[in-house]
Image (spheres, grey):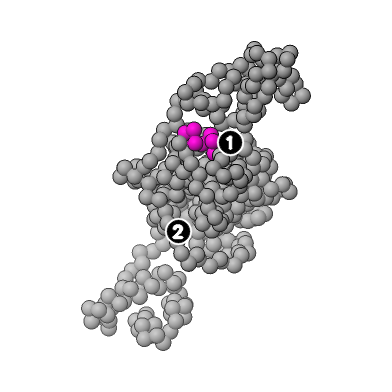
Amino acid sequence: MIREVLRSFRARELTATAAAQALHLGRSRFYELYADYLRACAARQAQRWEPPRSGGDHIAPWPAEVEPLLRKLLTAQPPASYSFAASEVLRRLHFQLDPATVRRFALQHQLAPSKPARKPRAPVRRWQCAKIGALWQLDATPHRFFPSRAERFPLLNMLDDCSRLRVGARLSDSENLLAYFDFLPRAFLAHGLPLELYVDYHSIFFSCVPDALTQLGATLHFYGISFRYASTPQAKGKIERSHQDWQNRLPPLFAAEHLRELPPANALLQDLLRHRNTQERHRELRMTPWAAWQLAAQENRSVLRPAPACPWWPYLWSQRTSLKIGDEGRVPIGTLRLRISAPPRTRVIHCQHPNGDLSILRHPPSKSTTPELLLHVPF
């Protein structure tokens, strides 16, 4: 009977679905059996071919914690996707599950979420850099990451164009200059300095004055990093797909864990970032981003530079404005007037740090001098 079903399928008298149903097999197992049958046909042994023994069920029983975790993620509002649920089981419980297995579990227990229509694939794949650190894609996406809150918080996101390593991801109250001054040095200290950042025409990155630099652009230029501008969102498709990935994964996870505030959410986000980089294979690279990063480093395909031990570092990553000392030797900062040990009517540099501290410098940053700190007020 099995030989007749496979012969009928080979003669196109049966469809794959009908043949698999006739043998009470799944499609993958049916095609494995059909491949073995074709090898027998090639050896002119089709009439004497017999199906090999399957060996029985070798699937290990699930740990007790797996099913409650799957139910928690799949019943969250919004529900987690099957691939993300499998990823969370691996990250938390160190137990490997295929997304198809999670799907079968969801269908069996009436936990299957409704899925949106699949988007068509892009017709053309964009180029990619050959070396790590040659280009990092940087962007922010506002989204309602906390289902229990109405606010849309921006997610600052950055990845390496060559290896797809996510070098940074962080939720912020708003997309402003201080948010980038907090986000970028974390990534540079962890991974090194790239050559270029691939960005859009946001006013934080692009100045409408020809050949002028924004304050962020001038800070990056101080360390030999320049901007490359993308004309459309589709031009930086890697970071846009990464945005979509975080938008699909974070809301159901935050809902399942009852997270409403940024600090615990960012702490969990860092764990997810490490897991994605080291454990999840990229479908185009066919390896994890961390493996691609290490392979490029071993093959000397790296233009990264270590973050310098520069005395200007803590002051460059701050929002700087020029102030004039008054006749009484004080400078206005908000509602305060602080005394400064410098001559009246001279100009000083006010630095607003991302953590809330403020500093007063005698001169603006310069590679030929060292910072002269006049005042530092902790937050």
Circle 2 sits on which residue? 126
Task: Examine the image and state in which quarter residue 48 appears.
Answer: bottom left
Magenta segment's dominant SS is: helix
Viewer-proximal residue among 111 and 249: 249
Specify start and end residues of the magenta stretch as a single range: 217-223
Q: Residue at x 64, y 21 (%)?
A: 347
Viewer-proximal residue among 150 and 175: 175
Q: Residue furthest left?
A: 43
Q: Please identify, in this view, whether the residue under mark 1 or under mark 2 is nearer the observer.
A: 1
Local packing at callout 2 (Cα closer than 10 Å; few below 14, some 14-19, many 20+) is few
**Picture coordinates of residue 168, whole percent (x, y):** 52, 42
Local packing at callout 1 (Cα closer than 10 Å; few below 14, some 14-19, many 20+) is some
Q: Quadrant of the C terminus?
A: top right
Res. 118 mark: none
**Picture coordinates of residue 339, whole percent (x, y):** 70, 14
Q: Residue furthest right?
A: 335
Q: Residue at x 35, y 64 (%)?
A: 55
Circle 1 sits on which residue? 215
Q: Are marks 1 and 2 in contact (CB under 8 Å)?
A: no
**Picture coordinates of residue 59, whole percent (x, y):** 43, 58
Q: Residue at x 61, y 16 (%)?
A: 374
Amino acid at pointer 1? Gln
Viewer-proximal residue among 220 and 287: 220
Q: Quadrant of the N terminus?
A: bottom left
